[in-house]
Image (tube, rainbow, N blue to C red):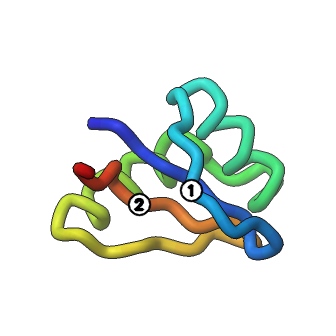
Amino acid sequence: MQIETRYNYEKIWTLTQEQDLLKIIEEEIGDAESRGTLSYIKEAIKNGKEITVGSCKFRMKREG
């Protein structure tokens, strides 16, 4: 699964690698379980939803 991210102040979505996703989540939620949060995000975006964690949005890469 390919995941795109976008901070609130950005206008474009960026394809993001898993190790960077974990860093973003840690920055946004602090010492909470970042791997568990990433698992939740992956499950939630499967149906085309966008998930917001702190000031960053996550979505599954869209074709086209």
Q: Is residue 30 left or right of residue 34?
A: right
Q: CA distance from mark 1 to mark 2?
A: 9 Å
| Residue type (three-letter) at the residue carrying disc 1 | Trp
Q: Amino acid at mark 2?
A: Arg
Residue 46 image offset from top left, x and y in percent = 20, 59
Q: Is residue 35 above or below residue 62?
A: above
Q: Please, is residue 45 above or below residue 34 in the view? A: below
Residue 12, position as x, y percentages in the image: 62, 60
Would you name the residue on which mark 2 appears? 59
In terms of secondary structure, where does tag 2 sit? strand
Label 1: how many residues lie within 10 Å, few (<14), some (14-19) or many (20+)? some
Residue 64 is marked as none
SS assignment at label 1: loop
Q: Nearer the viewer, mark 1 or mark 2?
A: 1
Residue at x 37% of width, y 47% of height: 39
Mark 1, residue position: 13
* Residue at (48% x, 49% y) in the render: 4
64 sits left or right of 26 in the view: left
Find the residue positioned furthest to the left: 47
Could you tell me residue 32's position as x and y percent? Answer: 69, 53
Residue drawn 51% across and 29% down?
18
Residue shown at 26%/51% (left/top)? 64
Say if 50 sits above or below 46 in the image.
below
Q: Position of residue 38 (x, y in %)?
A: 47, 47
